[in-house]
Image (cartoon, rainbow, N blue to C red):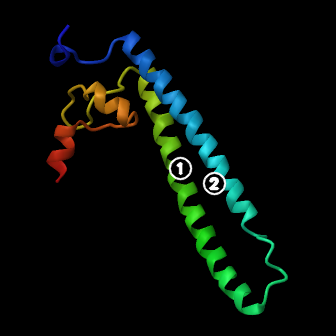
Amino acid sequence: MVQENKYRYNDAELEEFRTLVQSKIDKAKEQLALIESAFKNDSNNGTDDTSPTFKAFDEGSQVMSKEANSQLAIRQEKFIRDLKNALIRIENRSYGICRVTKKLINPERLKLVPHATLSIEAKNMQK
């Protein structure tokens, strides 16, 4: 069947996407755990015995590092949430259907951005 005539992905295709999305979730959770452990370990970099000037610089970089890690963690949590929402769409067989055009999103796009809800056509219309 030609893709343009399809209104949704078949069960076998959805199962492939499920595997892809689940592997992305697993990797994203591992990365989040690394970010969180770096965030927790930032509190002591072993600089207790350095001079006050260096300590002040170090504390400033610690704050920036914690802020950066916090932002990374927030982004990673959002990514995981988006991927979990993709799993829900796979379950209810609405995965890969553009929210705007109601056409199938190109499978190559979904392989690169498995949580996509817009086709390239719809993304271009937003600009």
Residue that mark 1 sits on: 76
Cα–Cα gap, marks 2 and 1: 9 Å
Tell me what residue is drawn at x 53 percent, y 49 percent. 76
Asked where in the image residue 57 lies, by quadrant, the reply is: bottom right
Give whichever of discs 2 and 1 has the lower sequence position. Answer: 2
The amino acid sitting under disc 1 is Gln
Answer few, some or many: residues within 10 Å of disc 1's Cα (few below 14, many 20 plus, some between 14 and 19): some
Looking at the rendered structure, the secondary structure element under dot 1 is helix
Asked if the residues shown at circle 2 and circle 1 are in contact, with their CB atoms under 8 angstroms apart, the answer is: yes
Looking at the rendered structure, the secondary structure element under dot 2 is helix
30 shown above or below 104? below
| 110 horizontally vs 100: left or right | right
Position of residue 123 measured from the top left corner of the image (x, y, whole percent): 21, 45
98 shown above or below 17? below
Tell me what residue is drawn at x 76 percent, y 70 percent. 45
| 24 horizontally vs 94: left or right | right
Label 2 or label 1, whichever lies nearer to me, is 2
Q: Quadrant of the C terminus?
A: bottom left
Asked where in the image residue 108 lies, by quadrant, the reply is: top left
Res. 35 mark:
2
Q: Quadrant of the N terminus?
A: top left
Answer few, some or many: residues within 10 Å of disc 2's Cα (few below 14, many 20 plus, some between 14 and 19): many
Tell me what residue is drawn at x 50 percent, y 54 percent. 75
Position of residue 104 measured from the top left corner of the image (x, y, whole percent): 24, 25
Position of residue 5 measured from the top left corner of the image (x, y, whole percent): 16, 14
Of 41 and 15, which appears nearest the observer? 41
Of 58 and 100, which appears nearest the observer? 58
| 39 horizontally vs 103: left or right | right
Position of residue 16 measured from the top left corner of the image (x, y, whole percent): 43, 17
57 shown above or below 121? below
5 shown above or below 127? above
The amino acid sitting under disc 2 is Ile
